[in-house]
Image (cartoon, rainbow, N blue to C red):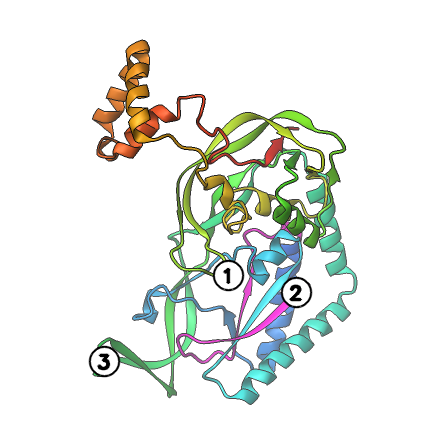
Amino acid sequence: MIIDTHTTDGADYQYDLTYGLDRAQQHPLVVDWQATAFDRNIFPALTQQGHKVAPYIVLRDEADIEKGFRAYNTTPRFSTGFGAVQNRPSLLVETHMLKDYRNRVTATYDLLQQILVYINQAPGTLRQAVTQADQEISTRTDGLPIPLSFKLVEQSIPFTFLGVAYTRELSAVSGAVWTQYDVTKPKTFTIPFFNQLAVDKAVVPPKGYIIPVHLTDVIERLKLHNIQFRTLERAETLTVDTYRFDKVSWQPAPFENHHLIKDLTVIPIRKTITYPVGSVVVMMNQRTAKVILHLLEPESPDSLLRWGFLDAIFETKEYAEDYLMEQMARQMLARDPKLKQEFEQKVLSDKEFASSPRARLGFFYQRTPYYDDRLNIYPIGRIAG
């Protein structure tokens, strides 16, 4: 179990402790354990001690508390998301920076104590939940998709929010509207809580993955996560399911020393790839199956691809001079009426393409034997069951 203790900021309110628990991506057995442990025992015990406890407050509109707050799904880069893909309960603890230091320490201490009290009172239940979850994940063969990301559902429940009175006025300093909270005036609001998440992206897991030996950074991350794999002792040429990428863009500023991929179009393809000696085969029949999926599936929000570990596949290494392609394009058009028709239709239907000399010549270059057929191709293969 993971307990991640923090102090937060944001809107002021009466609560001295808020929390986050993953219920969307977490294994159902662990979700059930969390509900029994926290919702029915630990949090009520804290309330009896005089603490005010609520789910982590993420306002939908910082300017208007009464528009409500929302649930959120943390991706595996965060502790609660990481716990979920590891089949382990992970509790985010947030006291508030505007509360005094003694209050914050006491709230955190009492929560940790109540967690230990409950685990002592229900010995073995946590171990049983995570062990069974590991077993089910490692032997899963149902062929159903596993979620990679989630989106908020526009449906809410009423929530009794223990806030404080506040005013908003135009600031002469910042030029923005300034919120001022008055902690001497507690105020109870009934606000909507948007607490439902729906699957946004999901993927059916393969039987396993095969990773070329040159992706040393990727292989090293597998080792750091204690993911089991075997190494090829001889080269193998395999036809695998993989992906081609289009319209790739990166975040303009670095984050955690990486330039993350902001957006991309993922196109499933089947391709024959030769994997050299030393390439690794990762099978999904292990307890870290969801970790593997999130590391190696490109559409996972925290995949190694999105974090920049495979950026080399987007680098153009081969090209043709424009004056050569002008000549070759004319030759190709003259001998291939279907190509001529395809080109003319694209010029008519795609304004961006039509206005780009580079794209128009690239249309022909991509159809020559000289084009790098590995460009924008995911080199990690999905092994079918």
Which residue is rendered at x = 62% and y = 34% of the image?
206
Q: Earlier in the sequence, mark 2 or mark 1?
A: 2
Q: Of helix, strand and loop, which one carries label 2?
A: strand
Q: Earlier in the sequence, mark 3 or mark 2?
A: 2
Q: Earlier in the sequence, mark 1 or mark 3?
A: 3
Question: Given the image, on which type of amino acid does mark 3 rest?
Answer: Glu
**Would you say the residues marked 3 and 2 are in contact, meaning their CB atoms lie under 8 Å apart?**
no
Question: Eyeballing the image, is 316 above or below 104?
Answer: above
- Magenta stretch in the rendered image: 1-29
Label 2, on which residue? Answer: 2
Label 3, on which residue? Answer: 169
Mark 2 and mark 1: Cα distance apart in space: 25 Å
Question: Eyeballing the image, is 324 above or below 161?
Answer: above
Q: Which is nearer the eye, 17 or 353? A: 353
Residue 110's quadrant in the figure?
A: bottom right
Label 1, on which residue? Answer: 257
